[in-house]
Amino acid sequence: MAAVMLISTLSSTTTRPPRPPHAPGPPHVPSLSRPIYAISDLHTDRVENLAWLRSERPWPADASVACAVVAGDISHRLDVLDETLRTLASRFARVFFVPGNHELWCQPEAHSAPTADSLAKFDAVLALCAARGVETAPALVGHVAVVPLFSWYDQSLALPRAALGSASPLPLRLWVDYTRCRWPSSLVAPDAPPAQDSAVCAHFLARNRPAIAAARAQMAAAAAASEGVRGVLSFSHFLPAPCCLPDWCVPDAPVFDTAWLSHGAARKAGLFASVAGSTALDAQLRSLRPDGETACEHVHVFGHSHRPKDFRLRGVRYVHNPVGKGTEREWRVLPSPAFVRLWDGNGNAVPRDRIIRYWAEVGKVTPRAAQ
């Protein structure tokens, strides 16, 4: 009953909850290093995913002393989100989270009180995180700076029209966010997709700026205390760069190769790229590296695409480790769900095999099935 009352309060249509802090001042440098794990796209409103979460299978042996970062898309349902956050917080010593697009769906449903708009829903989600002890602001975890970054998409990752060949991209109106998200008129003009996306993206990027300043202050305080920062772990739900797209096969390639879309699902790939993320997010995450720290390990975790990635480009390791859908696992597009370990308990980065196209490299499925 208490959880239901909290959810109703957080999602009230009459009042928007106070905005939780996203940029605290620099705290004292903690001496305790922790193992750090990452995951995204839990989608626990799916029966099979919620059953997995409730079981003993997901949890690393050292979860009780470890930290987990969750890069969005747990559920559009606040009751499911609440259970998932409570479960994560009961298993891990610290949990960090950023909302994804699913969290911002605000259609009325019987199991959840309606919200005024998607910004109100966003703030309600942050307030729920705070109530459950889940962190949404930058903080030091031992010698690693953990920096949650809010995000949206702005068509800056859209594939060039020529890359699609004779195919035309699927219409943007087919993307579910355009019917399930609702933005205040003070932010966007009604019925104006995709023009509204740039305004929404700019809003969340602006909310990141105080957090980035706070994270840099935290790292400077660590350096002044002779503790130092060995790593930066930034994370967002949306993709920060074209190289993170499912079909971008050579991370350092300056332009998209049309041969990468030979799988017969170019139209769907074209639609997804338009709603995948923002290059401005990459500029923000790259501004986090401590001044003069060329050896500092920087990992950026993202979500959204449900196509695993793990590669390095220009000093940043990009990681996507989604749970996704049961059907995607059946098709071997995704592996069995598991938290990926990024740092050990001594503050050392944990390497992993490079992943560009999991479904082709490991799953061994046909290109069209992967789409």
Image (spheres, rainbow, N blue to C red):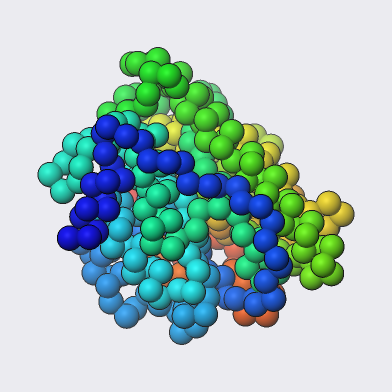
In the figure, is residue 39 to the left or right of 87? Answer: right
Among all residues in the image, which is located at the extreme bottom?
Answer: 61
Residue 16 in picture, x, y percent from top left: 36, 36
Among all residues in the image, which is located at the extreme right?
Answer: 292
Residue at point 22% right, 53% down?
Answer: 5
Residue 165 in picture, x, y percent from top left: 47, 26
In the figure, is residue 276 to the left or right of 365? Answer: right
How many discs mark residues in the rendered view? 0
Residue 348 lies, with reference to residue 194, above or below; the image says below
Residue 306 visible in this rendered orientation of the protein: no
Q: Specify the quadrant of the image occupied by residue 80.
A: bottom left
Residue at point 60% right, 76% down?
Answer: 34
Residue 192 lies, with reference to residue 297, above or below; the image says above
In the figure, is residue 139 to the left or right of 121? Answer: right
Residue 194 in picture, x, y percent from top left: 42, 21
Closer to us: 33 or 120: 120
Closer to us: 195 or 149: 149
Residue 35 lies, with reference to residue 282, above or below; the image says below
Residue 171 lies, with reference to residue 57, above or below; the image says above
Residue 306 in picture, x, y percent from top left: 41, 52
Residue at point 34% right, 66% down?
Answer: 86
In the figure, is residue 202 to the left or right of 102? Answer: right
Q: If the image is split into quadrants, where does the N terminus sit?
A: bottom left
Residue 236 visible in this rendered orientation of the protein: yes
Residue at point 48% right, 46% down?
Answer: 20
Among all residues in the image, which is located at the extreme left?
Answer: 110
Closer to us: 12 or 88: 12
Q: Specify the quadrant of the image occupied by residue 74.
A: bottom left
